[in-house]
Amino acid sequence: MYEAVATVVGTVVTEPVRRELPSGEQMLSFRLASTARRLDRETGEWVDNGTLFLTVSCWRRLVAGVDASIHRGDPVIVQGQLRSNEYHTREGAQRRDLEMRAHTLGPDLTRCTARVERRRTGHPATTGNISAGPGAATAETGAAGELKDPMVEQSARDEEPVNADV
């Protein structure tokens, strides 16, 4: 099977839904809208040029990050495999839905701001400290010996995240 890998910039239009499959595997899905825009040279204004709707599905490690970070209305950038699914409605009409199986997903920082919290995977964190002498900040203690969650490493900014400024 051929894989069509694409990147789509858009807005989350449904609240992400997390599901547990019979196998115990977790997945999360939501609908995404991406509107193409073009500059009308006669009027000098931006004009909408059609909207692409697709279902984004997230698997494995991506589920936890998206579940904790992404909500309806958030501007995002998604990269993954595109697939077309055909199905029949209850009325018997044949429909086709475009689905993206996401490899990576994050906020569109041209339209919002975000605070980064790194998840640990059991590897020692690189803190950027050249010499970690007594009293130096580490991933476990943070600044001035403050204890932190060993599974999360926060960015240097402790501001509240803003999901969208649109």
Image (cartoon, grey):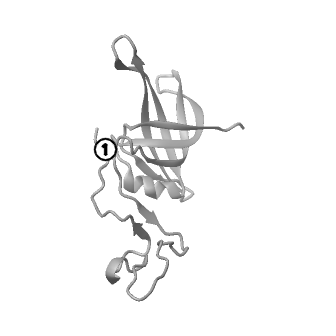
In the image, taking residue 27 as reference, residue 145 lies left or right, namely left
Look at the picture and state if 9 lies above or below 48: below
Q: Position of residue 162 (x, y in %)?
A: 29, 50
Q: The C terminus appears in which quarter of the rendering?
A: top left
| Residue visible at 45% across and 64% down in the picture | 118
Closer to the camera in the image, 1 or 137: 137
Q: Which residue is mark 1?
A: 164
| Residue visible at 38% across and 64% down in the picture | 155
Look at the picture and state if 153 lies above or below 35: below
Identify the residue at the far right of this view.
1
Q: Position of residue 9 (x, y in %)?
A: 46, 37
Quick one: label 1, few (<14), some, or many (20+) residues within 10 Å?
A: some
Q: Secondary structure at mark 1?
A: loop
Counting the numbered discs, the total is: 1
| Residue visible at 42% across and 69% down in the picture | 152
Closer to the camera in the image, 16 or 11: 11
Q: Position of residue 109 (x, y in %)?
A: 39, 45
Identify the residue at the far top of this view.
42
Q: Amino acid type of disc 1? A: Ala
Closer to the camera in the image, 166 or 56: 166
Identify the residue at the far bottom of this view.
134
Q: The N terminus appears in which quarter of the rendering?
A: top right
Q: Position of residue 57 (x, y in %)?
A: 51, 44
Closer to the camera in the image, 70 or 165: 165
